[in-house]
Amino acid sequence: MGTSNLCASAPSMADDVPVPDRICELLRHFYSLGWCTASGGGISIAAPDRSSIFVAPSGVQKERVSPEHVFSLSTDCATVLSGPPSGTLRQSECTPLFAQVYAHAALPAGAVIHSHALETMVASRMFDQEFRSSPSGAFEMAKAFPGYANSDDVIVPIIENTPREDALANALRAALLAYPCAVAVLVRNHGCYIWGETWGKAKTIAEALHYIFAAVERLHVAGIAPVPAGSFAKTPCAPRARMRAWFMDRKVDGEEAAAYVDIRAANRCAEDDRLISHGELDNLGVKHISFTGTEDCEVLAKWKKTRGYNYSDVITCSREGLGEKYPAMIEAFKKEHFHDAAEVRAVLEGSGTFLSSLFFRKFLYCIVCSLF
Ligand code: ZN
């Protein structure tokens, strides 16, 4: 446990240690665990009244950060409230990621831990779209997660890495919205973002999660509970947007459909919705590509021509992109409507969730697509 004094003082809700001091203490502890080495990883803690958040600086070795190095920021991380003298240090590169978790996690976050531990990186390579504990069986440690029993499957979405840490922000936000029950998001070949209501709860969740990652890896290597070959990441570190789809063997309409439009209200992990592969989607006639370009770009024109589509619905899935039309459009999406011809839905900005009912071989498929 290194020089940390965490062993002597158990985490409590009433924390009388100033947040900057607590951040330094935890960084030393996480450094000793291998979560924050080689200047990677970090932690952010919100002020007790949630009026501001605290982050460590970039460029200072984690075990050497002292309280006067710690920044206090507005809750959106846009404004520096206090910190080291201007020009001497910069805030952690993780700051935009911490801001996404504080803003969008369904489980309210009071602290966010970013781990570069080896087991988090390996876990990100063992699965294609989401880490699952189920191939290895049940873990007692799952009880560390809010609302989990020791028989529950621990699911952690995986997003693709980017050359710079701050460029992960959009994909992280999309994962937070698509997995409202998540307490962590893995970044391929990189590490993991983990959060909790308090720094103590975030630390407990992070310890349990590192244990489960390591357990799945060891059981796989020992041949005791191998992870199925099809689970492994097929495109590690692909720098492109991702689409995920879930299958529901029931018709979804009315209030439930509206809940899926407001994805934060959906509780997918508690249901039996099954993540389906891109190959299965292709077989259902839902083809997809990722491209860089505009509404009239060559890639999209060629795609429409080869597939015989006359119409394309070009979407900017963000409050910023839609402007004043945003509330009306979201309201319209809550009502079931029909498209009588096949079409392209080209998403140029942001992310979103589409609920589609498809008839295929006399069966009705309800599919939720989330764009990362
Ligand atoms: Zn990192």
Image (cartoon, grey):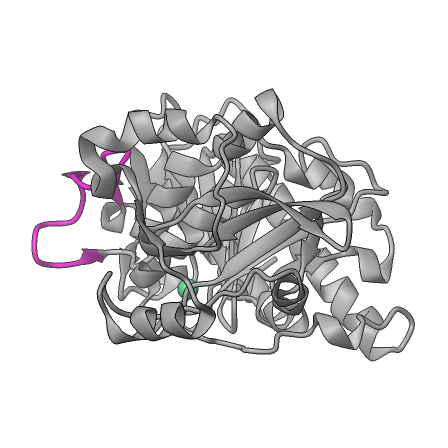
Q: Is residue 332 left or right of 228 when viewed as pictured?
A: left
Residue 170 in view here: yes
Q: Quadrant of residue 33?
A: bottom right
Q: Quadrant of residue 90?
A: bottom left
Residue visible at 62% across and 35% down?
A: 10
Place of residue 286 in the rendered image (x, y in percent of width and height, measured from the top left) = 56, 60
Viewer-proximal residue among 202 and 103: 103
Q: Is residue 169 left or right of 149 when viewed as pictured?
A: left
Majority SS type along the magenta span: loop
Q: State which quarter of the image contains the C terminus.
A: bottom left
| Residue 277 in magenta stretch | no
Task: Name the residue furthest left.
Answer: 86
Number of numbered callouts drawn:
0
Q: State which quarter of the image contains the N terminus.
A: bottom right
**Residue segment shown in magenta:** 71-90
Place of residue 17 in the rendered image (x, y in percent of width and height, measured from the top left) = 42, 32
Viewer-proximal residue among 273 and 149: 273
Ligand 1: give its quadrant. bottom left
Place of residue 125 in the rendered image (x, y in percent of width and height, measured from the top left) = 62, 73
Place of residue 27 in the rendered image (x, y in percent of width and height, measured from the top left) = 44, 54
Residue visible at 72% across and 70% down?
A: 231
Q: Quadrant of residue 227?
A: bottom right
Residue 197 in view here: no
Viewer-proximal residue among 115 and 132: 132
Please, is residue 284 above or below residue 152 in the view?
Answer: below
Residue visible at 16% across and 49% down?
A: 84
| Residue 80 in magenta stretch | yes
Task: Name the residue furthest right.
Answer: 224
Please, is residue 128 above or below residue 198 in the view?
Answer: below
